[in-house]
Amino acid sequence: REVWPQTRFDGLDMSESIEEAARRGWVDRGFRGRFVDKAAEIEGAYDVVSMYHYLEHTREPLTELAAAARVVRSGGHLLVELPDPESVWGRWLGKYWIHWFQPQHQQFFSIGNLRAALGRLGFRTVAVERAGAHQAVDLSVAALALIQQLAPPVHAPWRPTDGARWRQLGRAALFAVAWPLIILGFIGDAALKVIIHRSGAGSN
């Protein structure tokens, strides 16, 4: 709002948090529900629609993009940010790569497939950014995920209660020993962020 004081900012979410956001004045108008169900109501209403870390959570992403094509005015912009399934980190870290994030992430678009899908809907790609969007979390979260697998949380509802005390002690001991691995992950992430931003390659 400080940058664009005359701009109206609206938001949409499935939960009551969007109604709370409207009450607090964080958005001018809050829509609660599914974007595809609201598209007809707000057709052609927006200069910009943003889908930041959104498409990968949806069951039918092509339907979501079609809804965006209805809502964005002619000459407007659609902003999409999502994990890159072609990232080298997804291959190197395998199931420990945070951005696979199962079961929440249900869909993955390569940049080529996303551009093709948008083109079929009448959009023209004006910018693609990889390095600048990189999130420096791959190594540190992978280290944490490995430790969690070796010593899973004891009090999860599906875990047996027998021997819980000993498993809790074992988990605490493993975390105490493995902290250097997590710290190395954070250091590696910070270093890689600099390298990725300078080289333009390897973004997640």
Image (cartoon, grey):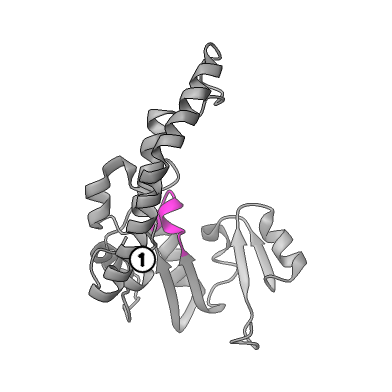
**Nearer to the camera, 194 or 36:** 194
**Residue 139: % across, % down:** 34, 51
Report the residue that reaches farthest toward the right.
Answer: 23
Q: Is residue 127 visible?
A: yes
Q: In this view, does 102 lie to the left or right of 88?
A: right
Position of residue 166 relative to residue 46, above or below, is above
Q: Quick one: SS at disc 1?
A: loop
Figure quadrant of the C terminus: bottom left
Figure quadrant of the N terminus: bottom right
User: Which residue range is magenta in the image?
Assistant: 52-61
**Nearer to the camera, 111 or 35:** 111
Q: Please state the total of marks drawn on the protein image.
A: 1
Residue 3 lies in quadrant: bottom right
Q: Which residue is drawn at 22% across and 48% down?
A: 92
**Nearer to the camera, 163 or 41:** 163
Mark 1: which amino acid? His
**Residue 30: % across, % down:** 67, 65
Q: Is residue 125 left or right of residue 51?
A: left
Report the residue that reaches farthest toward the top.
Answer: 162
Q: Residue at x 41, y 68 (%)?
A: 80
Q: Can residue 152 be seen in this view?
A: no
